[in-house]
């Protein structure tokens, strides 16, 4: 008869690893490093984009009053068309020197 007081080792479970989605691509691959020419073109591209945005912002700030009166005139034209009540402001025109005439004054 076996000895009941003796401890026996439990059988070890065989653990299996689950499949991973990690790719085998190594970012240190020398073939995939960007060349100096490509980095330089990227730098020039970003530089041109930032310069264009800066110049566009400067142009908007320089001509903000002209833009305002253009949008105001456009707004009145749209409201006149949509309302059907006739002319909202007679003779509203954009004049040199940023003076708006008309507006019932």
Image (cartoon, rainbow, N blue to C red):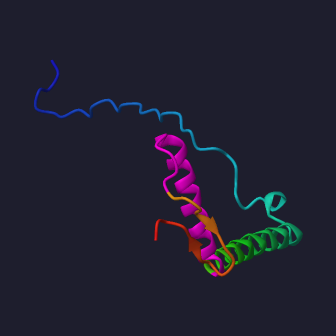
Q: Residue at x 64, y 44 (%)?
A: 23
Instruction: Assess whether residue 77 is covered by the magenta stretch.
Output: yes
Q: Residue at x 57, y 72 (%)?
A: 100
Residue 60 location in percent, x, y? 64, 74
Q: Nearer the viewer, residue 9 or 59?
A: 59
Q: Is residue 75 left or right of residue 7?
A: right
Instruction: Assess whether residue 3 is covered by the magenta stretch.
Output: no
Q: Main secondary structure of the magenta part?
A: helix
Rendered position, 12 above or below 54: above
Q: Is residue 50 left or right of residue 37?
A: left
Residue 85 location in percent, x, y? 46, 43
Residue 8 location in percent, x, y? 23, 32
Q: Nearer the viewer, residue 103 or 45?
A: 103
Q: Quadrant of residue 37?
A: bottom right
Q: Residue at x 58, y 44 (%)?
A: 22
Q: Quadrant of residue 47?
A: bottom right
Q: Residue at x 73, y 76 (%)?
A: 51
Q: Nearer the viewer, residue 69 or 47?
A: 69
**Outermost residue toward the right?**
37
Query: Across the whole image, how many numbered discs are drawn on residues?
Result: 0
Q: Is residue 36 left or right of residue 17?
A: right
Rendered position, 58 above or below 19: below
**Outermost residue toward the left?**
5
Q: Quadrant of residue 67?
A: bottom right
The quadrant of the image that shows the N terminus is: top left
Residue 56 location in percent, x, y? 69, 73
Which region of the structure is painted magenta?
62-88
Rendered position, 96 above or below 86: below
Q: Is residue 99 left or right of residue 41?
A: left
């Amino acid at each position: 008869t076996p000895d009941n007081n003796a401890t026996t080792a439990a059988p070890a479970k065989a653990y299996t690893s689950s499949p991973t989605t990690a790719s085998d691509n190594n970012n240190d691959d020398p073939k995939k490093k960007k060349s100096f020419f490509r980095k330089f073109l990227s730098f020039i591209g970003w530089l041109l984009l930032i310069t264009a945005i800066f110049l566009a912002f400067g142009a908007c700030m320089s001509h903000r009053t002209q833009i305002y009166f253009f949008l105001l005139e456009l707004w009145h034209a749209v409201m006149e068309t949509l309302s059907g009540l006739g002319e909202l402001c007679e003779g509203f025109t954009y004049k040199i020197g940023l003076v708006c005439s008309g507006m019932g004054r």
